[in-house]
Image: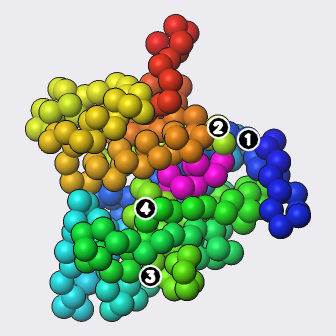
């Protein structure tokens, strides 16, 4: 158990939590059969501490289209004006978050849905990238782990929607879910971060499924991030994996959504792994 002090109060941080980012092209919790939520509930029942961070890109896109709101993306990040922020907050917090909570509770797991705004759990600076054209998008995300730690000790599964408070004025900011998950992982020393996605491994050649990469050091991941083969939605994941490991996470795993994906990634290295150090002989 790790102990932290904040405002002269001492808080306990559960050791080695699993931080799971669920989203991408999936609709988390929408289908009756959901192997990832099955596994999360089973791991929770076995005594593991799990934080689930979700996205919601496809459903946000659909909701924006229904309202005639056009959106742009820059380097995989969604530009967000005040009108689209209201829709994003509605879809993430009121629809997807509570749907996941219900789905986990149907599987016998206690789950609590929160936004990163709750308790100041996530704070960020308004992004100035791309000449400020991202709008109400946050970067340099920081996580205050106290609320999450309290929920883990219940024990419950925190289900976290990726919205943050602006450090300057406490307005809402839209946060890339990968970056939100990385900030959470950095706040829980020795935890493991999992990106569950629609490809089995990161590809050295984006168009070639046979070119999967088993492992990156942080420096190698940074070099790959600067290459032409690191494209679109993979860029925020690689960037977030680097941030998580530099912040103290044990490792980041990028794995395919399928039954048993989390255990296979962690126990059998069935994933692309980003870690600060090379594996020892016993880990190979």
The numbered mark, 3 or 1, whose residue comes first in the sequence reads: 1
Q: Residue 15 carries which label?
A: 1
- Mark 3 or mark 4: which comes first in sequence? 3
**What is the x, y in percent for residue 193?**
52, 43
Residue 190's mark?
Answer: 2
Q: Residues under labels 3 and 2: Cα distance?
A: 31 Å
Quadrant of residue 28 within the rendered picture? bottom left
Label number found at residue 284: none
Label number found at residue 89: 3
SS class of the residue under badge 3? helix
Of label 2 and label 4, which has the lower sequence position? 4
Q: Quadrant of residue 87?
A: bottom left
Placement of the N terminus among the 4 image quadrants: top right
CA distance for labels 3 and 1: 31 Å
In front here: 29 or 76?
76
The picture places residue 104, in percent across and down from the top left corner, at 58, 60
Q: Distance between the residues labelled 2 and 1?
A: 7 Å
Which element type, helix, strand or loop, lies under badge 4?
helix
Label pair 3/4, CB-CB below 8 angstroms: no
Residue bounds of the magenta highlight? 181-188
Q: Is residue 186 magenta?
A: yes
Q: Where is residue 268 in the image (x, y as percent from the top left)?
A: 48, 23
Residue drawn at 38 percent across, 58 percent down: 23
Give the CA distance from mark 2 to mark 4: 20 Å
Task: State the colouring used for the structure image.
Answer: rainbow
- Specify whether residue 108 is in view: no
Q: Say if mark 4 contacts mark 1, CB within 8 Å.
A: no
List the residue tagged with mark 4: 177
Q: Do the residues labelled 3 and 2 touch (CB within 8 Å)?
A: no
Find numbered disc 2 in the image and state the secondary structure of the residue it sits on: loop
Q: How far apart are marks 3 and 4 (CA)?
A: 13 Å
Closer to the N terminus: mark 4 or mark 1?
1
């Amino acid at each position: 158990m790790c102990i932290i002090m904040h405002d002269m109060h001492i808080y306990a941080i559960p050791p080695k939590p699993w931080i799971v980012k669920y989203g991408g092209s999936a609709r988390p919790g929408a289908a009756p059969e959901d192997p990832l939520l099955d596994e999360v509930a089973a791991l929770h029942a076995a005594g593991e501490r799990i934080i689930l961070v979700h996205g919601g890109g496809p459903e946000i896109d659909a909701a924006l289209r229904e309202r005639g709101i056009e959106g742009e993306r820059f380097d995989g990040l969604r530009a967000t004006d005040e009108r689209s922020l209201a829709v994003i907050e509605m879809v993430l917090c009121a629809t997807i978050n509570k749907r996941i909570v219900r789905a986990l509770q149907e599987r016998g797991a206690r789950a609590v849905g929160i936004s990163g705004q709750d308790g100041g759990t996530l704070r960020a600076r308004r992004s100035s990238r791309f000449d400020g054209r991202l709008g109400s998008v946050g970067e340099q995300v920081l996580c205050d782990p106290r609320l999450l730690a309290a929920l883990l000790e219940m024990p419950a599964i925190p289900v976290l929607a990726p919205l943050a408070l602006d450090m300057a004025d406490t307005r809402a900011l839209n946060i890339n879910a990968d970056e939100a998950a990385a900030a959470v992982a950095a706040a829980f020393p020795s935890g493991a971060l999992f990106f569950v996605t629609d490809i089995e491994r990161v590809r050295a050649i984006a168009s070639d499924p046979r070119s999967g990469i088993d492992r990156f050091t942080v420096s190698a991941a940074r070099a790959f991030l600067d290459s032409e083969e690191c494209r679109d939605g993979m860029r925020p994941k690689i960037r977030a994996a680097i941030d998580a490991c530099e912040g103290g996470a044990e490792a980041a795993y990028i794995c395919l959504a399928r039954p048993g994906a989390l255990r296979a990634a962690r126990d059998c290295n069935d994933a692309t792994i980003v870690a600060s150090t090379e594996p020892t002989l016993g880990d190979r």
